[in-house]
Amino acid sequence: EAQVTQNPRYLITVTGKKLTVTCSQNMNHEYMSWYRQDPGLGLRQIYYSMNVEVTDKGDVPEGYKVSRKEKRNFPLILESPSPNQTSLYFCASSFSSGSKHTFGSGTRLTVV
Amino acid sequence: GENVEQHPSTLSVQEGDSAVIKCTYSDSASNYFPWYKQELGKRPQLIIDIRSNVGEKKDQRIAVTLNKTAKHFSLHITETQPEDSAVYFCAAIEGGNEKLTFGTGTRLTIIP
């Protein structure tokens, strides 16, 4: 089944404790991206990647890192999480930026 | 960068009536405009998209129109049904790069 798999679904952590949210797709998509969703603000792009070893900043990249060492994986790294990073995070993949995005099931992150 | 504005933020319509959601964008070079539907607690899913070389696209009860001169595009849902209740997001690809910018969403409620 074609899908984007995110883990974990829920995460509560403390300020400053490094964490990684994993994202994997099995559709051989070149384009992958991360979004955060906050009430009233919609979906805001954090980082995107057009291919292996090619990543670029979205609209809200501060406090986040990503890597794209393999085509299928695109982890989101929070080196020192802060409470303002409490949010719902979605990973997505597509053949290109101008084609249908397939979203993962989301990760609800709480930073206390 | 690209700026996408979406209106209204909430919309209630009687079952069977039509619903219209409007978005404007700022970058005249934007060339891809998708619409996503997000049901409560679920991931966003593409419902229709349009490219800048087309003025209108229809898929059963859903249609999207694009006015490049005015830089706005609209989602039209006819004969609304209870299952159309959801949050709808418009988006635009920023011309010249691969960033996808979303609007802030419209919560559509269909009143039985």
Image (cartoon, coloured by chain):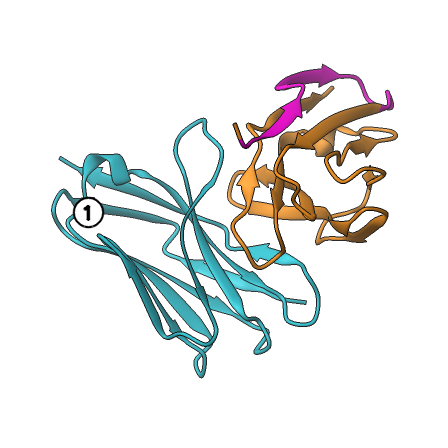
Q: Position of residue A90 (x, y in %)?
A: 61, 35
In terms of image quadrants, where is residue A111? top right
In terms of image quadrants, where is residue B38? top left
Judging from the image, mark 1 belongs to the subunit labelled B
Within-10-Å neighbours for mark 1: few <14, some 14–19, many 20+: some
Chain appearing in cyan on the rendered image: B
Quadrant in which the N terminus of chain B is drawn: bottom right
Q: Where is residue A80 in the image (x, y as percent from the top left)?
A: 87, 29
Front residue of B46 and A15: B46
- Count numbered badges in the picture: 1
Front residue of B57 and B64: B57
Residue at 75% x, 34% y: name it: A73
In this rendering, the answer to whether B104 lies above or below B44 is below
Quadrant in which the C terminus of chain B is drawn: top left
Front residue of B1 and B57: B57
Q: Does the magenta stretch include residue A99?
A: no
Answer with left or right where residue B17 lies relative to residue A61: left
Residue at 68% x, 61% y: name it: B98
Residue at 77% x, 50% y: name it: A51
Residue at 77% x, 34% y: name it: A76
Looking at the rendered structure, the kind of residue marked 1 is: Val
Answer with left or right where residue B20 lies relative to residue A18: left
In this rendering, the answer to whether B29 lies above or below B62 is below
Q: Name the residue under label 1.
A: B13
Q: Position of residue B100 (x, y in %)?
A: 61, 56
Q: Position of residue A88 (x, y in %)?
A: 60, 31
Magenta residue span: A2-18
Chain appearing in orange on the rendered image: A
Front residue of A97 and A44: A97
